[in-house]
Image (cartoon, coloured by chain):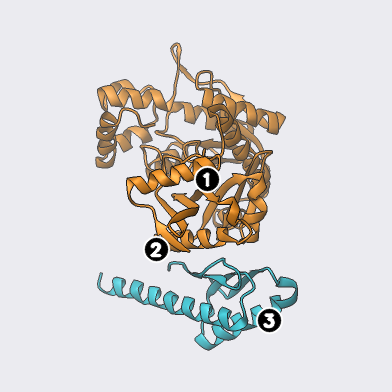
Amino acid sequence: MTIEDVILEQEKEAVKCFLHQHNLSYDEDIDESIVLREDGKIIGTASVSGNILKCVAVDSEYQGENLLATLISALLQRLRQRDVHHVFVYTIDDHVARFKALGFKPIVQTMTTALLELGGSIQEALLNLKRSHALSDAPKGCVVVNANPMTLGHVHLIKTAAEHHAETLVFVVSEDRSIFPFAARFAMVTEACRAIPGVTVLPSLDYLVSSATFPKYFLKSESKIREEHALIDVLTFKTYYMKAFNISHRYMGEEPFSPMTSVYNETMKKYLNNQCHIVPRLKLGEHPISASTVRKLLRHHGLTEAISPYVPDATVAYLNSPEGETIIRRLKHHEQRH
Amino acid sequence: MKKVTVGTLESSDCQITLSPATHRHVVIDSVVQAVFGEAIEAVIHRVLDQAGLDSVRVDVIDKGALDYAIEARLKTAIKYYEEAADEKELSIHTG
């Protein structure tokens, strides 16, 4: 039995075919794949995207030989070279026990999907975050933003939360998949929140991910993927974040247009009940302010006066920096990126 | 300082991760925890004592490794860990 890296296009095709036989698909955002072969024949495969293990399958004939341990160990060894020691896996309910046997710890589980981690602990990570910011145990309001980039809509949402709570936490999504990098988004939010009393800005850590990262390989339809992503995220937020930081209410922007976010808002509403407030969007004339509108303006017109009614000074200042200029150039070139 | 991980999750092996900490902190997750948990911890502490390593966190995922296998894995981890520390120091000195 040998472990091999998947490099050539034809090898990738063979992996796709193998996954297909196991009723799984190959996600497009994979960084690295490996296969386990016996006499040239693929008997198992595993892949990774960032720190998320995905597209894991073992030939049913060989199940019981613990080939999963061989595959996962080989993949972890490759990740160490990139200094990744903390990994996640989303998998179907039936495979939870196998990952647990390897030392993975379950975070949350739905009817169909489970999220597990190895090399880190969500409780410890959140506790460390709480300690390092010397946060109190008092009840708090909470807002989670990607802020790609920060708009006056975000400011409005955060202010609404801060009006109702002595202390408000603003989590900025740590995952670096947006056109504005995390460091820039975090800096814009921190700067824009400076004048709002009782607000602490924190990184969301690896546990709240966007639907772009959410693995799709074992889910069949777009709508199912959206539902499962929302559910995992809501359960993680409710089970760990609300508890660790004593969050009493979460504030979310209304999403009349995007089906993605409206599923998310509905799920949040269902599980948090009256602990969740959907705040109507701040409007400019008839149009709700959104980060996508700002990106669109930047893409078509660059940095002009036209964006100032949409964004706080912190965002303008960032867009004026050399880094900001690079992003505007990239926006103009990458029409499709979000 | 960076983390170092060695070993595998395969049967009869163990995976050990060393990371910087303010004091020595050993976390063991073993399939034979109930019977050998304390024995494994004793091996870890003995090897750490020999290496004079105190401000470190050790995470062990044990799949039923024998004590000399655990010892060997830990010694390897310590070697890499100290090499990583030396490299970092070197890069500070050389700017």
Q: Quadrant of residue B44?
A: bottom right
Q: Which is nearer the eye, A167 or A231?
A: A231
x 40%, y 39%: residue? A188
Residue A55 percent location from the top left of the image: 50, 46
Residue assigned mark 1: A204
Q: Which residue is mark 2?
A: A81
Foreground residue, A18 or B47? A18
Q: Label 1 near label 2: C-beta < 8 Å?
A: no
- Does residue A232 lie above or below A253 as drawn? below
Disc 2 chain ID: A
Q: Which chain is orange?
A: A
| Residue nearest the observer in this picture, A49 or A36 | A36
First in residue order: circle 2 vs circle 1: 2
Residue A132 drawn at (x, y percent): 54, 57
Location of residue A208 by image quarter: top right
Q: Which residue is mark 3?
A: B39
Q: Secondary structure under badge 1?
A: loop
Could you tell me the amino acid type at mark 1? Ser
| Residues at marks 1 and 3 on the same chain | no
Q: CA distance from mark 2 to mark 1?
A: 25 Å
Question: Residue A285 at x, y = what percent?
Answer: 43, 12
